[in-house]
Image: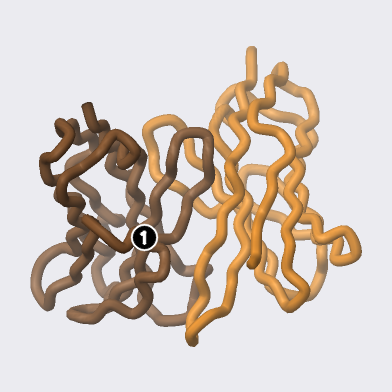
Amino acid sequence: AQSVSQHNHHVILSEAASLELGCNYSYGGTVNLFWYVQYPGQHLQLLLKYFSGDPLVKGIKGFEAEFIKSKFSFNLRKPSVQWSDTAEYFCAVTSFSGGYNKLIFGAGTRLAVHP
Amino acid sequence: NAGVMQNPRHLVRRRGQEARLRCSPMKGHSHVYWYRQLPEEGLKFMVYLQKENIIDESGMPKERFSAEFPKEGPSILRIQQVVRGDSAAYFCASSPRQGDADTQYFGPGTRLTVL
């Protein structure tokens, strides 16, 4: 069965620090990969997605992620975080089953950015 | 254009009571997905519905849980005789087309607490 693992459950950074959140998935076939963000009290929003093509994907708010097929990884990065990036981040992969795509999520990483 | 609406946002029930969670998809969306997030875990797929049809309920517990998406009105996730282990955040997502996981738009979630 497909699974997604996120290495860090809690990350604390100071403003302007660089961010990298790890995500690994287990699935041998073609995958679509996503990062979602949930700001406090708000709904999940799509940050970025990878379907095919350039493995370096740029998303909203200065985030990017790199798909490394050989490592089954899709790590999220941002060169300089801001206090407003404080949120929970979820990595997800789709499983094509029964004629449609089902999202499989990692456990999430809570990021706290201190001014 | 309103997003996916869920109500109530917070629901408290005593053991043995029923919980009804509502999800109104985005306008023009006829596909609804329910996910559950247990404490310290990622979102887990529960059920996928189209209008008046359950397409995939492979993630639903076999007993006490049911879901519907009637021709008119919101989608309802119903939990009968709740137990403490049902305490979780329940998220609904909607999409306009079948098979497009990248167009799933999420609601703010309902946080169920069972006393």
Is residue B73 toward the left or the right of residue B21 in the image? left
Q: Neighbour class for label 1 at 10 Å: few (<14), some, many (≥20)?
A: many
Q: Position of residue B68 (x, y in %)?
A: 19, 68
Q: Does residue B25 appear to the left or right of B103 in the view shown?
A: left
Report which quarter residue B65 is drawn in: bottom left
Q: Chain A's shade in the image?
A: orange
Chain in brown on the image: B
Q: In percent of the image, x 19 and y 35: which residue is there?
A: B11
| Image spot of residue B83 (x, y percent) | 25, 39
Image point 77% across, 73% down: which residue?
A28
Where on the picture, by quarter, is residue B49? bottom left
Q: Quadrant of residue B88?
A: top left
- The residue at 23%/49% (across/down) is B6
Query: Which amino acid, mark 1?
Result: Ala
Residue situated in front as seen by the camera: B94 or B16: B16
Q: Position of residue B114 (x, y in %)?
A: 24, 32
**Residue beneath disc 1:** B93
Q: Secondary structure at mark 1?
A: strand
Report the quarter where the N terminus of chain B lies. Answer: bottom left
